[in-house]
Image (cartoon, rainbow, N blue to C red):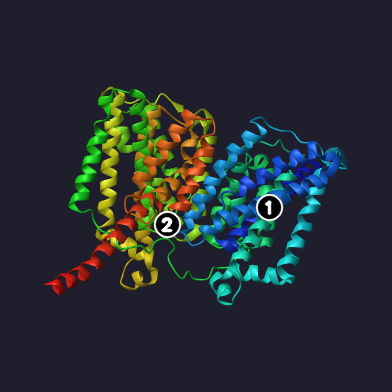
Amino acid sequence: MAFYVVQFLTGLASAASLFLVASGLSIIFGVTRIVNFAHGAFYMLGAYVAFTLTERFSGALGFWGGIVVAALAVAVIGVLVEMVLLRRIYHSPELFQLLATFGLTLMVEDLVVLIWGPDDLVGRRAPGFKGAIDFFGQNIPSYDLFLIALGPVVLGILWLLFQRTRWGILVRAATQDRDMVAALGVNQKWLFTSVFALGVFLAALGGALQIPRDAVNHAMDLRIIVEVFVVVVIGGLGSIIGAFVAAVLVSELNAFGILIFPKISIILVFLVMAVVLIVRPWGLFGKPEAPARRTPGLTVNPWRPLTTNERFAAIAALLVAAALPVLNNPYLLTVGSEIAIFVIFAASLHFLMSVGGLASFGHAAYFGLGSYGVALLATKAGLPMIVCLLLGPIVGLLGAAVFGFFAVQLSGVYFAMLTLAFAQIVWSIAFQWVSVTGGDNGILSVWPSSWVASPANFYWLSLGVAAFAVVILRIMVFSPFGFALRATRDSPLRSEAIGINSKRIQWTAFVIAGTVAGVAGALFAYLKGSVFPDNMGISLSVDALVMVLLGGVETVSGAVIGAIVYKALNIWLVSQTDLSKLVLGGFVVLIVVAFPKGIVGTLEALMHRRRKSSSSASPLLSSRIETAE
């Protein structure tokens, strides 16, 4: 019995740091509506800065002074980030703000390696909490007891701050309806800055307090951000009490899951999140959001089919790409095949986001299911490659059909979080079902048939499938189905009033996107010759989002350019420098600030302005000619 009590207390200690980080993210998202992927980076910075201050300046600051100063220093960095970067893009499409914070995360990951090195750093023990307390034969670290007491204290302080101060009342009001708060004359600019500073302070404090418990390393950000998103969604956006309860729930599930449900311990948290989202979409303690007054990022000029000149240009570009094998460079052809595959993957997500208005944070699940589908058919059943390529993506189709049925019942960030939960469930199954998937060792020897074994032939196959997939998706955009999907995106009530079954249309689009992603995953398995759980990991889903947003979510085919630019730049930077993430992240942030509509979106906007200015000048020119005559 004592063992289970100690395990429970260990879970509560972990919940304290998780609550600090999650409450900060909940406050930031609740007010600014920014899906802040950089929140984990601030947590990591808090740990690194605290390590430096407690090791090198312990005489001047002391251990606890170093912890507090580290959190304050990172909060100042957060304020600078908000003022220099985020304040410039508050009126950009919301997903572009996600792209900016993702780029910032990439930069921070390389910066901490550059400053502190790649090795793990082990911090000193907290003064006064170095020992352990005996509990019926089981030792409980005294520092864990300190964290257990700290959690409710921070909760109480935050509750008083938000319930008993004017600033807190404004923050709670902005969480429910930002437009109404602005209409009352509140300076949103400084309200957002103060909220962001508080959120970053809490994240950095959570990271700083971890140095006596865990080693500080450059992978801390991605490890914590997933759990934090789960906590925020389960607890309810903008709810501090919800964040506390959800942090305790998630931490105890992690503590006891391995004991009670060892085979599903990894997916247990995501199963709980999925159930909560299906039953209560706004979280346990959250409230339904005020109806949106606009469709963010999807109010551009009406889409149109390609003109004759644009068709010829597209065909010419495809022919030039098809001539790449004449260079007789196997490495270049392999890179070209990978880019073509990711064009398919990005185009599938772009179809779902641009036409359907559904931003999936777990689209890699269907990419990975397609990869495992062909790998199992090729290695277990021994089927030829052409049969595997036809049947393998069906696994992605089936996964999208099942998960999509539940996901399309939600919208906005709740839809995105549910897709993330499903993706993590699929990843966990692939990771733990060792007898079928090989677990972390993956499935090897997935080799292409002899007719496409050469780099040139496989490149042509990948390029042909990519061109076919993009053309089919574009045809769907301008089909009756595509118009119905766009109507559902722009006005669900009006579309249902004219007889469109909104949920069925969205579910169909979800299945189509998942199937096309499965095709990309199937080709990727043969390109690499192996399949691993990382094929459906969060980082791959984020990569797909970056490609779409980089090209332009408001365009019809922007994902093609986004995938080519992002993937080519990523591969080239990895081969040229050890700081590839720093350069790539900086490029992503630059694109967001300079071209908030994406590469293709910005070019289309410039062309539209030029056509508009030339057409407006024509009547004036005609009148001048008539006057001269």
Density class for disc 2 (Cα within 10 Å; few <14, some 14-19, many ≥20) is many
Image quarter in which the N terminus is found: top right
Q: Is residue 73 above or below residue 430?
A: below
* Precedes in sequence: disc 2 or disc 1: 1
- Rounded to the nearest whole Å, what is the CA distance between mark 2 and mark 1? 33 Å
Q: How far across and down, in percent of the image, does residue 605 sit?
A: 34, 58
Residue 135 in view: no
Instruction: Name the spot of residue 253 as percent of width and height, x first.
Output: 66, 47
Extreme left residue here?
629
Please give left or right for residue 154 compared with residue 436 in the image. right
Viewer-closest of 226 and 160: 160
- Amino acid at circle 2: Leu
Q: Nearer the viewer, residue 60 or 525?
A: 60
* Nearer the camera: disc 2 or disc 1: 1
Instruction: For the residues labelled 2 and 1, say whether their Cβ atoms are less than 8 Å apart.
Output: no
Residue pointed to by mark 2: 358
Asked which secondary structure carries label 2, the reply is: loop
591 relative position to 37: left or right: left
Q: Position of residue 609 (x, y in %)?
A: 31, 61
The disc at residue 75 is 1
Query: Is residue 214 in view?
Result: yes
Left or right of residue 321: residue 135: right
Rendered position, 440 above or below 427: above
The amino acid type of the residue labelled 1 equals Ala
Q: Quarter-wise, where is residue 49 in the image?
A: top right
Secondary structure beneath disc 1? Answer: helix
Which image quarter is the C terminus in? bottom left
Task: Count residues near mark 1 (Cα–Cα under 10 Å), then give few for <14, some for 14-19, many for 20+.
Answer: many
399 over 24 or under it: above or below: above
Judge by depth and name the residue closer to the eye, 418 or 320: 320
Q: State whether residue 482 is above or below residue 208.
A: below
Residue 174 disc label:
none
